[in-house]
Image (spheres, rainbow, N blue to C red):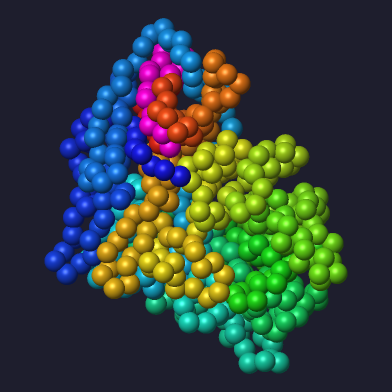
Amino acid sequence: MPRLRRVLCSVTAAAAAVTVAAGSATAASGPLITPAAPVVPAAQAPAAGSRTVHEWLTNPGDATPVDTQLSWQSPAAAAPTTVRLDPNVKFQTVSGFGAAITDSSAQVLYGLTPADRDEVMKNLFDPHAGAGISFLRQPIGASDFAVGQDYSYDDLPAGQTDYDQKHFSIAHDEAQILPLVRQAKKLNPKLQIVASPWSMPGWMKTSGSMIDGKLIDSPKIYRAYALYLTKFVQAYQRAGVHVDYLTVQNEPQALERKNYPGTDLPWQQEAKVIEALGPALRAAHLDTKILGFDHNWSEHPGDIASHQRAGEDPQPEYPYDLLSTPAAKWLAGTAYHCYYGSSDAQTPLKASFPGKDIFMTECEGGDSSTILGVMRNWGRSSIDWNIALDENHGPHLGGCGTCNGTITVNSQTKAVTYNDQYRDIEHFSKFVPPGAVRIASSVVYTSGSSTPIEAVAFTNPDHSTTVVALNNAKTEQKFTVVSGERSFDATVGAGATVTFQWSGR
């Protein structure tokens, strides 16, 4: 999506004096932080009763943002396009926005000097000096973005088993992944984590490998896998990282993954895993919540074909089927991915199971429109994929050969580029902190049946209000934001995303 200009609206003119020079080298021998995505300092709320909305504008190539005040009008003026808010109508509470420190991302970040890595981490996670990323998706063992070879935390020679997990170890993660996650948590204490396995250890599977295959259908295996996941949460906790949410299988409908870890886990088996895992977590006095499914809004035609080739029935209603089992008592909600279908699928699931939450836990290649759709359909989070990759979209084991990171670190020059994904996350993560609540917003277009403007609105814990809007048109658009009896006018360039924020309602 083109980014002709970026508008970020904060709530204080004083913050305009604070900038992070993302377009300058951090050190003579360090990487060049490119100006593709200037880092905007977080805003501080103005005094109560403020009658201004501060506009933060960044153009491609700009090193620092420009702060422009917008003026409230009273009473609200009419406009061809109106974004109308009702703070009295409230929806879901936000958990956060972010990406994933995969094994590959960790290696890429550790290719930087310590000083340069610290600067990048600050730009990613610091709520005041950076984007304020507030949610991480952490693989449990190897994903397709791992370095060298796949791995679990209990690998054994062929033919051996370890039901009591005597050989369990997270030593692999202690070198690079855990130090980065701890640093991220220190930079943003409100950071939350959802962890997900691409595969259980190979000795638990019909394939005998982390590649493809199914979980062996045996009570002993279900108990062993529940113990494996419980020991992971405990080990991370001892390492200083609290795991807030856990899924039991990444993309359980993804069969025929021949060159990277994956498992065919039908909802019937996932329910058995959860019925073993829930009591195991409780017995261990862990407050980690379980999310079900962790796959696309709709079953991908390729996955349907894989099921049919395997002689299995497709499971297009997987989240509904899972939440209709006794395992649902252990589920906090459902995790979705964005790779097929529409975020509209989230709302009927929420209507069918109103006591269960919805999370977007992976979306490589998404943009502001994707996040807007997730939020407008009851999503509590929106998490992109790798937080950092090199210029060759890696390193990786099979899987996606074209995936981009939130940032790109050139493997030769160590130049750091902040990609569109960084900007899209920043529009939300900087101005919609954990604990914010989505409020009612509607876009009214009086000159036709549809509008190119998308919008979503939130009330934040500090009682400020945030509106994020996107202009999908190929031309500049003018619109009016109306809250109660007052309004302000805005002009947004083609393809631009704008975030407004002001004190109070």
Q: Is residue 204 left or right of residue 393?
A: right
Q: Is residue 266 visible?
A: no
Q: Quadrant of residue 31?
A: bottom left
Q: Quadrant of residue 252?
A: bottom right
Q: Residue furthest front?
A: 474
Task: Check if residue 38 falls in the magenta segment.
Answer: no
Q: Position of residue 10 (x, y in %)?
A: 32, 33
* Quadrant where the image shows the N terminus: top left
Q: Is residue 324 left or right of residue 98?
A: right
Q: Is residue 364 left or right of residue 211?
A: left
Instruction: Pick whichever, 200 or 445, lies toward us.
Output: 445
Q: Residue at x 49, y 62 (%)?
A: 403
Rendered view: 329 above or below 177: above
Numbered range of the magenta stretch: 480-495
Q: Position of residue 244 (x, y in %)?
A: 54, 56
Q: Is residue 90 visible?
A: yes
Q: Residue at x 81, y 62 (%)?
A: 268
Q: Main secondary structure of the magenta part?
A: strand
Task: Check if residue 492 falls in the magenta segment.
Answer: yes
Q: Position of residue 80 (x, y in %)?
A: 48, 15
Instruction: Pick whichever, 262 or 121, lies toward us.
Output: 262
Q: Residue at x 54, y 19 (%)?
A: 445
Q: Residue furthest left?
A: 28
Q: Residue at x 80, y 74 (%)?
A: 217
Rendered view: 434 above or below 139: above
Count the marks: 0
* Quadrant where the image shows the C terminus: top left
